[in-house]
Image (cartoon, helix red, strand yellow):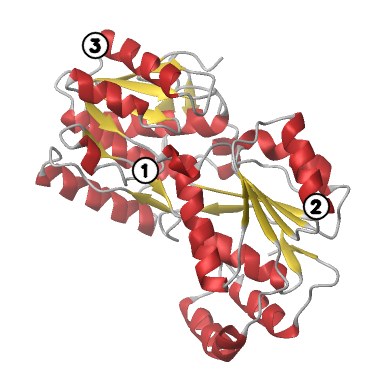
C-alpha cells in the first residue's frame, strides 16, 4: 500500500505495527505471522501523538450516514485510547475548505471528511499542509498526503433488491435518491439487478431530491413514488423520512446506512445495506501514528466486512432470507458478481457484454441506468 511519510510523528513501535497491518492482499498464514510478531507492539502501543478530527456533513442523530460514521469513530477512540474532535453540519464548498484549513493550522495530523462534496476542498487544503494526513470518504481523488476510502455497497444493494422484489405484490419499486453521481447511480442499478433476478418484470422508479439530508424533501419524494404505484421503497438518503412515508402508506421499506431503526419501523422495514467503518478508521489512525498516511484508494467489500446487509424485518419470509444468504455467500466467495453481463441500459443499449464483469473503474464512473429503472441520470 502506497503511503506518505508524516514528519515528526514516527514512533518505531507503532510504525512496525502499521506496516505489518496494512497489507490487503496477504494470505491467511502471512496475517497470522504478522499478528504473532506484532502482538507485543500492539499491547504497548502509544497513540498519544495522534490528533484526529472528523468533519461531518450532518449529525450522528440522523440514524443514517453520519450515525454510522460516528460508530466507526467511537471504535477508533475505544481501541486506541484517543479523543477525536467532531465538527458537524459543515456544508460542502467554501466552508468545508475553511474548516479543513483551520484544522490543519491547529495541528491535527489526521483529518477525515465524510461527504463526497468535501473532496475538492480537502484536496486543495492537503496541498498546503504536507505534514498532515487527509482522508476522504466516497471520493476518488488522492494526493501525496490524501487518501480516499469507500466500499462496494452495490453488493448489499443487490441483495436488498431481492428482498424488495420478493415483498412487492406489483413489482413496482420506488427509490428516493440524493444526487445523480456514480455512487448513487451504481446503487440504484445494483438494487434493480437484484430485484430483477427474482422478478424479471420488476421496475424501479427514481425520485431525485438534490440533497443528502432533508427529511421534508425526502418524504415528499417518497410520497410521489407511492402515489405513482410503488409498494416498496428504497433510498440513498441520510434520514428515515422514506421509511416514515412507507409506514404511513402501509408499504414496505429498504433502508440504508444503519439498521438501528428496524424495530421502530416494524411491519414496514425489510432490510438495509449497512456500513462498518470502524476497522478502516482504526487502520488509518494506526498508520498515521506510525508515521505514514494511507494514500492508495481503499474499496471495502462484504468479504472484508466493510459492507453488510442489515437485519431482516418480520415480513421477510424464511425462503427469501435463505435465498439472500445463498447469494451473499456467493458474492463473498466471488462466484457472484452483480455487474456481470449481459446488461443493457434502460434505453436498450448493451453496456456490459455477456459473461463480462464490470471493472472497478467502470463501476466508479457509472453514468447510466440499467434496464428496469424508470428515470434519468441527469
Q: From mark 3 to mark 1, how far is it between C-alphas?
A: 24 Å
Q: Position of residue 253 (x, y in %)?
A: 26, 30
Looking at marks 3 and 2 on the same chain, the residue that comes earlier in the sequence is marked by 2
Residue 160 shows which numbered tag? none
Which residue is situated farthest in the right direction here? 128
For the residue labelled by badge 1, is the local secondary structure a helix, a strand or a loop? strand
Check if mark 3's residue and mark 1's residue have beta carbons within 8 Å: no
Q: From mark 2 to mark 1, how far is it between C-alphas?
A: 34 Å
For the residue labelled by badge 2, is the local secondary structure a helix, a strand or a loop? helix
Quarter holding residue 329: bottom left
User: Vertical placement of 25 versus 204: above or below?
Assistant: below
User: Vertical placement of 20 versus 254: above or below?
Assistant: below
Q: From mark 3 to mark 2, how far is it between C-alphas?
A: 50 Å
Which residue is situated farthest in the left direction here? 318
* Front one among 81 and 24: 81
Q: Position of residue 174 (x, y in %)?
A: 32, 20
Answer left or right for 161 relative to 70.
left
Residue that label 1 marks: 273
Looking at marks 3 and 1 on the same chain, the residue that comes earlier in the sequence is marked by 3
Residue at the image position 60 percent from the left and 33 percent from the top:
365
Q: Is residue 357 visible?
A: no
Residue that label 3 marks: 229
Residue at the image position 80 percent from the left and 52 percent from the top:
104
Residue that label 2 marks: 104
Q: Position of residue 346 (x, y in %)?
A: 42, 17
Looking at marks 2 and 1 on the same chain, the residue that comes earlier in the sequence is marked by 2
* Front one among 31 and 238: 238
Other residues around mark 1 within 10 Å, as few (<14) / some (14–19) / many (≥20): many
* Front one among 341 and 20: 20
Residue at the image position 42 percent from the left and 24 percent from the top:
215
For the residue labelled by badge 3, is the local secondary structure a helix, a strand or a loop? loop
Amino acid at each position: 500500500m502506497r503511503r506518505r511519510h508524516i514528519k515528526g510523528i514516527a514512533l518505531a513501535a507503532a510504525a512496525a505495527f502499521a506496516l505489518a497491518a496494512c497489507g490487503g492482499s496477504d494470505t491467511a498464514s502471512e496475517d497470522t505471522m504478522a499478528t504473532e510478531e506484532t502482538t507485543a507492539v500492539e499491547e504497548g502501543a502509544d497513540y498519544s501523538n495522534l490528533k484526529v478530527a472528523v468533519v461531518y456533513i450532518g449529525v450522528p442523530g440522523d440514524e443514517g450516514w453520519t450515525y454510522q460514521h460516528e460508530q466507526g469513530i467511537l471504535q477508533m477512540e475505544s481501541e486506541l485510547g484517543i479523543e477525536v474532535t467532531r465538527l458537524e453540519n459543515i456544508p460542502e464548498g467554501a466552508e468545508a475548505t475553511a474548516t479543513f484549513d483551520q484544522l490543519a493550522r491547529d495541528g491535527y495530523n489526521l483529518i477525515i471528511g465524510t461527504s463526497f462534496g468535501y473532496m475538492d476542498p480537502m484536496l486543495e487544503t492537503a496541498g498546503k499542509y504536507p505534514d498532515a494526513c487527509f482522508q476522504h470518504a466516497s471520493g476518488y481523488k488522492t494526493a501525496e498526503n490524501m487518501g480516499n476510502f469507500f466500499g462496494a455497497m452495490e453488493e448489499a444493494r443487490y441483495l436488498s433488491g431481492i428482498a424488495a422484489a420478493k415483498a412487492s405484490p406489483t413489482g413496482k419499486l420506488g427509490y428516493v435518491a440524493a444526487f445523480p453521481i456514480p455512487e448513487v447511480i451504481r446503487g440504484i442499478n445494483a438494487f434493480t439487478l437484484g430485484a430483477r433476478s427474482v422478478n424479471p418484470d420488476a421496475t424501479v422508479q427514481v425520485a431525485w431530491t438534490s440533497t443528502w439530508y432533508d427529511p421534508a424533501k425526502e418524504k415528499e419524494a417518497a410520497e410521489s413514488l407511492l402515489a405513482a404505484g410503488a409498494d416498496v421503497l428504497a433510498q440513498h438518503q441520510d434520514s428515515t423520512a422514506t421509511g416514515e412515508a412507507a409506514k404511513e402508506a402501509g408499504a414496505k421499506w429498504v433502508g440504508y446506512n444503519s439498521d438501528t431503526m428496524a424495530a421502530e419501523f416494524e411491519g414496514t422495514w425489510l432490510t438495509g445495506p449497512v456500513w462498518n467503518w470502524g476497522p478502516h478508521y482504526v487502520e488509518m489512525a494506526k498508520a498515521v501514528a506510525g508515521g505514514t498516511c494511507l494514500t492508495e484508494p481503499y474499496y471495502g467489500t462484504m468479504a472484508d466486512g466493510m459492507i453488510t446487509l442489515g437485519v431482516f424485518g418480520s415480513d421477510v419470509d424464511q425462503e427469501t432470507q435463505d435465498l439472500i444468504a445463498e447469494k451473499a455467500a456467493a458474492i463473498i466467495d466471488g462466484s457472484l458478481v452483480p455487474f456481470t453481463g449481459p446488461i443493457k441500459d434502460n434505453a436498450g443499449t448493451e453496456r456490459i457484454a455477456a459473461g463480462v464483469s464490470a471493472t472497478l473503474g467502470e463501476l466508479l464512473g457509472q453514468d447510466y441506468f440499467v434496464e428496469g429503472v424508470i428515470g434519468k441520470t441527469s
